[in-house]
Amino acid sequence: MKPYTLSFLLFALLFSCKEKQQKINHPINYIIASKSDNIKKVLDSITNHEVQFRYTEIKKTNGVFVVNNFDFNTNSNNYFYPASSVKLPIAVLTLEKIFESEGYTKDTEFFIEGDTLKTTFAKEIIKLFTLNNNDAYNRLFEFLGQDYINQKLKEKGVENVRIAHRLATEDADNVTTKPLVIYLNDSTTINTKAIINSPITPLQLDKVKKGTAYIDNDEILQKEPLDFSLKNYYSIDAQQQVLQRIIFPESFKKEQQFNLYEDDLSFLTKVMSSIPKEASYAKFFMYDDTKKPIPNNIKIYNNIGYNYGTLTDCAFIEDTENDISYMLTATILVNKNEVFNDNNYEYETVGIPFLAELGREFYNYNLQKKQN
């Protein structure tokens, strides 16, 4: 063997180890290098799938949690339909409005004018996460109103978000809310007034018109892109900003935190981490493509959205046994035929397998970092 051959082999080995270490040290490189078909086939076609994700490292420095974001293809100017992921800000703002009120709590009973259900704010918040219930979202939406929601998020410093409408109901974008009857006790009630909110203005964003055709409310095929400009808007950045204020409120200035009682914050995180038996979708990351139970040491505090071929999950994931914690927010579009509202989407074959594998890969990334 020539002398330089051994040197070359040693150099190649060192370079290979360095390259492997670099992949471990940088989380996005780790994902890009994944050998999983569920990830590779999506990343090879990210334009069609409009994939965006943000991974957030969490470190505790001098008693304060510090986050470090790593982005893949994230762009707040590239629109995706958030679907039910907007339920988290509605839940937390409901608790904040109650905190700032006088005379009632989350367990106070109420009903919406014209509704037949007498319920409590707590029960409706629980339904948001355990049943992904749209009616519950709509009831809390009437309590808050669009202007209140958007103004409060702006005051907290949460940008790139616009809540405009109710979910899966007629007259969803009506700017006038319905009055509530709130029961202070058996004999005393508060009758709220209808709120007249600002008109909904079209979003000026890229990718706000999607596909080549869609089926309208009369079940007629319209051969033009579907316009989402009057829909809800909730970017990757905004979703993580809201979640961080819930999981690590002390890392923000007082005026940027949500005003909540400690027990209300505990209540919210508890229902977010619940594993509902009734729901078909709950935890996209790591587990939704498998029937395996989630181990007791793994906690996932999340909020999902799925509609119009778009799947989104925003989660704080922790492993109490291995001292691992991170945040992950991702969205993917699965609409191969580019026709919207035809219920022909690749949720089960492409979308959920991708998100589940993405969650597992980032978990494995953290495990490997612990071992190195």
Image (tube, rainbow, N blue to C red):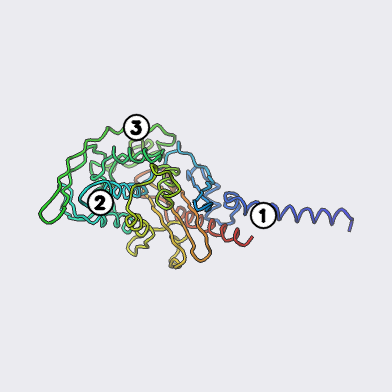
Nearer the observer, 262 or 193: 262
Disc 3 designates what residue? 202
Side (left or right) of 195 relative to 297: left
Does the CB distance between marks 3 and 2 fall below 8 Å?
Answer: no
Work out which residue is located at the far front of the displayed protein and give it: 62
Q: Position of residue 270 (x, y in %)?
A: 36, 60
Q: Position of residue 8 (x, y in %)?
A: 82, 53
Residue 135 - label:
2
| Quarter of the image where one finds residue 241 | top left
Does the CB distance between marks 1 and 2 fall below 8 Å?
Answer: no
- Secondary structure, mark 2, is helix
Residue 20 - label:
1
Side (left or right) of 10 relative to 271: right
Three-letter amino acid code at the position of disc 1: Lys
Q: Report the residue at 26% width, 49% height from top.
A: 98
Gap between marks 3 and 2, in whole Å?
25 Å
Side (left or right) of 250 relative to 73: left
Nearer the observer, 38 or 178: 178
Tell me the crowding category of disc 2: few under 14, some 14 to 19, or many 20 or more residues within 10 angstroms, Cα based: some
